[in-house]
Amino acid sequence: MTADIIDGKAFAAGLRARVAAQVGECRARHGLTPGLTVVLVGEDPASQVYVRNKGRQAAEAGIASNEIRLDAGTGQAELLAVVAGLNADPAVHGILVQLPLPPQIDAAAVIDAIDPAKDVDGFHVRNAGRLAVGLPAMVSCTPRGCLMLLEDQLGDLSGLDAVIVGRSNIVGKPMAQLLLGANCTVTTAHSRTRGLDAHCRRADILVAAVGRPEMIRGPWIKPGATVIDVGMNRLDAGNGKTRLVGDVCFAEAVEVAGAITPVPGGVGPMTVAVLLSNTVTAACRQAGVEVPAG
Ligand code: GUN
């Protein structure tokens, strides 16, 4: 059996088009232009690419997109002052401080300083807590994108066994909350889980977000399972170039799984599309208007 390939790139393009329609409706009905500001501290090359993509795709969807670049030596107080200014600016509905931050900055304190209503990353403890207790929240973009792909592929997820490999605040933990909310039976495994392969083999839904290249092998996968690979690991291709691989050994998994996301072109494009969707939601909530259906 060869797995269906879940085309995250195409799904994300559709989502961006729906977000653009929502932005058009916000403008026409309420004179509301959703605004997103991304803050980048330092010159990390990968972060620069991510931030450029976020800005370009936001602008293409009609979102008022701004980027604040601060040098790598920026201090904590200076960054907190920038965040306070954005919190107070009514034209800014979404704030994203690109991670990782330089070592002199306490990332948790910065996230804590962002107005939870403008926290389009869903990283603030208020949003993480609201998600955990089932209240409306801004939800972390990557796991929300994974859930969209899963529901598109499988429909109702009720009763399915879901195993998440990875326990980060950005992906693993919110993914577990979302899948619980969708009535899955959820196991959160991680790099120190004993018998990880046996846990994985029980999964109808396997989400790999552990950050270890091709760690999850074909024989670990239950035949017919749906595999979501969040990993983005850059390996040396030997010819002076690099190649991007996931946390799942795709060549093996594709022979066993029922459906699988490729790397690249699976989960990756969903993250920015969901960020744009979160920005529209944040803008509508702040303006006290209904989020357009899109
Ligand atoms: N760095 C890598 N991914 C992300 C993300 O989704 N949000 C933020 N703020 N930083 C990141």
Image: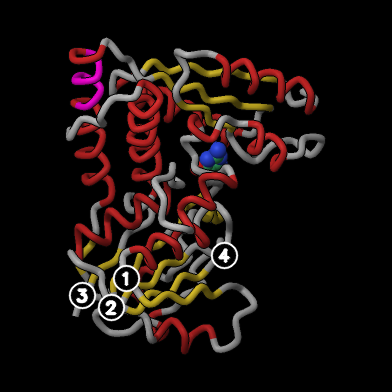
Q: Which SS type dominates the magenta stretch?
A: helix
Of the residues under marks 4 and 1, which one precedes in the sequence? 4
**Residue 37: image location, x then y, percent:** 50, 21
Residue 177 image position (x, y, % from top left): 44, 62
Q: Looking at the image, which residue is at 28% across and 78% down?
A: 159
Kindly tell me whether mark 3's CB lies below 8 Å from ligand 1: no
Residue furthest to the top: 31
Tags 2 and 3 touching, CB below 8 Å: no
Where is 166 relative to 161, above or below?
above
Residue carrying label 4: 167
Give the magenta range.
22-27
**Mark before the other along the chain sequence, 2 or 4:** 2
Q: Quickly name the residue at label 1.
A: 183
Disc 2/disc 1 C-alpha distance (Å) = 6 Å
Secondary element under disc 1, as helix, strand or loop, is loop
Q: Amino acid at mark 3?
A: Thr
Observer-side mark, 4 or 3, equals 4
Residue type, mark 1 in image: Asn
State which quadrant residue 10 falls in: top left
Q: Amino acid at mark 2?
A: Gly
* Front-most of residues 130 and 150: 130
Please state which of the two labelled residues, at mark 2 or mark 3, is closer to the viewer: 2
Residue at position x 42%, y 49% in the image: 142
Sequence-earlier tag: 1 or 3: 3
Q: Which residue has dot 2 on it?
A: 159
* Residue denoted by label 3: 2
Please say if the residues under marks 4 and 1 sit with CB atoms less than 8 Å apart: no
